[in-house]
Structure formats: C-alpha cells, structure tokens
Amino acid sequence: MAACNSSSICSSIRSPERIRHIHRPLSLISSSNVCLLRRDALSVSAGRMVACFASKDWALPRIAAGSAPAMVPAQQEAEARVSTVVEVGLGNRSYPIYIGSGLLDVPDLLQRHVAGKRVLVVTNTSIAPLYLERVVEALTNGNSNISVDSVILPDGEKYKNMETMMQVFDKAIKSRMDRRCTFVALGGGVIGDLCGFAAATYVRGVNFIQIPTTLMAQVDSSVGGKTGINHPHAKNMIGAFYQPQCVLIDTDTLNTLPDRELASGIAEIVKYGLIRDADFFEWQEKNMHALLARDPNALAYAIKRSCENKAEVVSLDEKESGLRATLNLGHTFGHAIEAGFGYGQWLHGEAVAAGMVMAVEMSYRLGWIDGTIVERVLNILKQAKLPTSPPEMMTVELFKAAMAVDKKVADGVLRLILLKGPIGGCVFTADFDQKALDDTLLAFCRR
C-alpha cells in the first residue's frame, strides 16, 4: 500500500484472508473475551485462555473450551439453524451477528438477548404484514413473561426524520416501557437507524436488537452501531453510536426483497472489495450473476464476508476516528445525491454506486489508480444494474453545497475516501488537488 502522510488515514488491512468460523454451542460466545490479536497469537483475557484462528493479518479470538456444556433443546435448534456467527469485538459491548436460513423461527436466538420483560418491535408498513407476527411469536414462544408491543411506521427514506421517531417514543411512553425494555428493529436500513437512535435516547438508553430484512441492512447498516435520522439538508446528521445486543440475519427474508432493493445492497458489497478485500472483489466479478439470481449460497457468502469486513473495522475504530471512515467510499458524493435529488428518489445503494464511480474517477485523475480499475468498477456496477452517474438534475453547486455539510468535514475542510494503489487499498484524506475534485464534478454534472 502506498504510504500515507499525516493528513490521511489508510486502510490498515487490505485483501485479508477471512476470519474462519467454527461451529460451537452459541452459549459459548463470550462478550468479555473478544479483541483483535496478531495472527498465530494467544492471549489471556480476564484470566481465561483464548485462541486465535489464522487470518492474513488479524484474527478474532474465540474461547478455547475444553468441553461443551450440555445444551437444552432450544439451544440445539438454534445451533442447527445458524450457519455462521460473526462477532463484533468491542470488549464488554461485543455482540454476535447470527447468519442463517429460517432464524426468525428460532425463539431462543432472540429471547436470550431480551433483558427485561417488555419489548417494542419497530417496523414499517411493508415489513409488518410479512414478518411481524413471526417475530412476536419468536419473542414470546414458551416464555409468558415477555410482553410485546409494536409500532408500524410509514416506509421510505423520506420518513427517516424526527417526526417519525416521535411515533416510537409515543408508543413506548403509552405502553409504559421502562429502562429494562428492549427495542427490536425489524426492517431495512431506515428502520434500523431510526429504531437504534430511539433506543439510544429513550430514558437515556435501552437495549435493542437488529433484525435486518434488506440486503443493504444485512451487509452494512445493521452492523457497527451507527444510528440516526436525516436533516432536510443533510443525511444522517443527527444520531449516535449505539451498539445492539445482537444482529439476527435470516437470509430467507431476501426472498421477498424487490430486485431494485437487492441491487442497492450489492453496492455496499462491492464497496468492501474495493477498499480492503481484493479477493472478495474478484469473487464478486465471477459471481454477480449468482447474486442477482438470488442463489442462496452466493448470498450467504457475500453477507458473511461483508459482515466480517465491517466487524473487523468497527472493532478497530468504533467511533470513526479514522479507519472506519474508509467504509464510506462513494458516500460523500452519494449522500449529496440523496439530499439534492430528494430523499427516497434514489435508494441509498443507487446513490452510493454513482458516488463510488465519481470517487474512482477522481482517484484516477489524481494518478492514484490506473485505468483498468476504473473499467472494472464500471463493469461490475453495470452488471449489478446500478447507476454509474448521478441524476441529470444534479449540478456542481448542489454537490458542493451538500458536501460542505458532510459528516466527514473537519474544521471546515472536506475529507474524502479515495482509492490508492491496487484494488483493496484506499485513503481517507483531505490532501488532494482541489482541481481533481472540480474536474470530476464537471465531468459528471452540468454547471
């Protein structure tokens, strides 16, 4: 990777071999023993030995148990259904990401993460008819102590605002939810972000669980604790870092996902390959047809590997002081499109796809990547049926106005995530030629 100067943050892990997973009783997952260690290392945490499973640069340790405790039938069912567990290592706030088919029908997975007796499920008008009843059943099956209420919000990015979030608070207060209650986000990225922010602020913080039902949410927004709502002039400007108790990904929910939403999620999958995982990007180039055809094995693999990448970065930089910002490749341009064009006109992944093309073009203009990378990015996004340029109504001034209030601006200076070197390498930097940005905007929009 090219050297970084003091004003830049480089992606510290490029093209890693992925963290290997072992199948073991889920009850053995310990949040107090998760950290990042160098490959082939052993560490003693809280007086217990943990073992590292090899990866190219880093690995997540797991408890090395000599023998497994006997599992009750509910635990055995959960163990059988979950194909993968990815752990987000954040010390005593670590949590599992469960990935598998049919997980909405496994009560033990959800119930083990409910702290008190009261649950509020937050969902929307599209998802409620499909999955709300099953989630309520999973939360209450065999456990008469748990009482579940729900609030059904309007569907769409344009409703990701304070007015809609107040509906969550209204329901929680009317239902007399207390500090031991649990909020459950059942839906896509809008529901997850909004419910998470409500959980972070209701009585100054209650537990919450993520059940993402879109590919976008499963591979990105449900993982890492970013929560928030939009301001009319800037996306996600109001929010908090607030981690869930767990993320439960039932891959079967993708069966009801519209094709346009599926493609939107693929944009974030492509992003991981470009910024830090070249092998994954090459796999995507060979398997895009399988993803679009909803091949269950291809989707499960893409979700797992995306979650591994996201979890690894979040474990190193939870509050986005540097490294985590690299996960926003294309987002500065993309958020400008969403704000300028109108929230909900384009899906988030559609805007990010066009934004990634712009970021890649700017990287090329700076001389940081060669032209073959530009072509490969264009080709894979076209295969995914995603936009490769912004809407015609976007002007240079609209872009600049939105980018001026981007969350990555520091002391009035715009910082961007750009590619540098071969695929898998990127920088988060303010040290770029302004002319390259101006020329890129002019190439993609009218004045």
Image (spheres, rainbow, N blue to C red):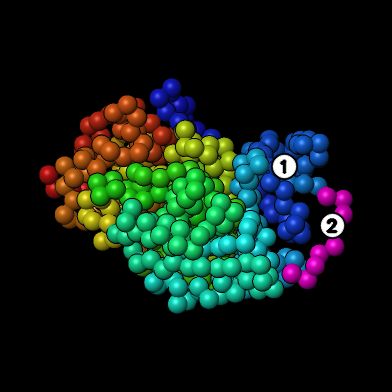
Q: Amino acid at mark 1?
A: Asn
Residue 275 visible, this angle: no
Residue 84, percent from left and from top: 65, 60
The residue to which callout 2 is attached is 68
Residue 44 visible, this angle: yes
Residue 291, percent from left and from top: 48, 66
Which secondary structure is most common in the magenta stretch? loop
Marks 2 and 1 in Cβ contact (< 8 Å)? no
As drawn, which residue projects farthest toward the left?
Answer: 447
As drawn, which residue projects farthest toward the right?
Answer: 67
Query: How many other residues sit within 10 Å of disc 2, few (<14), some (14-19) or many (≥20)?
Result: few
The one of 264 and 128 positioned closer to us in this rendering: 128
Q: Pick whichever of labels 2 and 1 is earlier in the sequence.
A: 1
The one of 373 and 363 positioned closer to us in this rendering: 363
The residue to which callout 1 is attached is 33
Residue drawn where x is 45% and y is 58% of the image: 173
Residue drawn where x is 66% and y is 67% of the image: 145
Residue 150, percent from left and from top: 48, 68
How many numbered markers are drawn? 2
Q: Report, in whole angstroms, how far the alpha carbon at label 2 lies from the one at label 1.
A: 17 Å
Query: In the displayed structure, would residue 363 be above or below residue 250?
Result: above
From the viewer's perspective, tell me whether residue 139 is left or right of residue 267: right
From the viewer's perspective, tell me whether residue 381 is left or right of residue 312: left
Q: What range of the chain is rendered magenta?
A: 65-74
- Label 2 sits on a secondary structure element that is loop
From the viewer's perspective, tell me whether residue 150 is left or right of residue 344: right
Residue drawn where x is 65% and y is 40% of the image: 91
Query: How many other residues sit within 10 Å of disc 1, few (<14), some (14-19) or many (≥20)?
Result: many
Query: In the displayed structure, would residue 140 be above or below residue 58?
Result: below
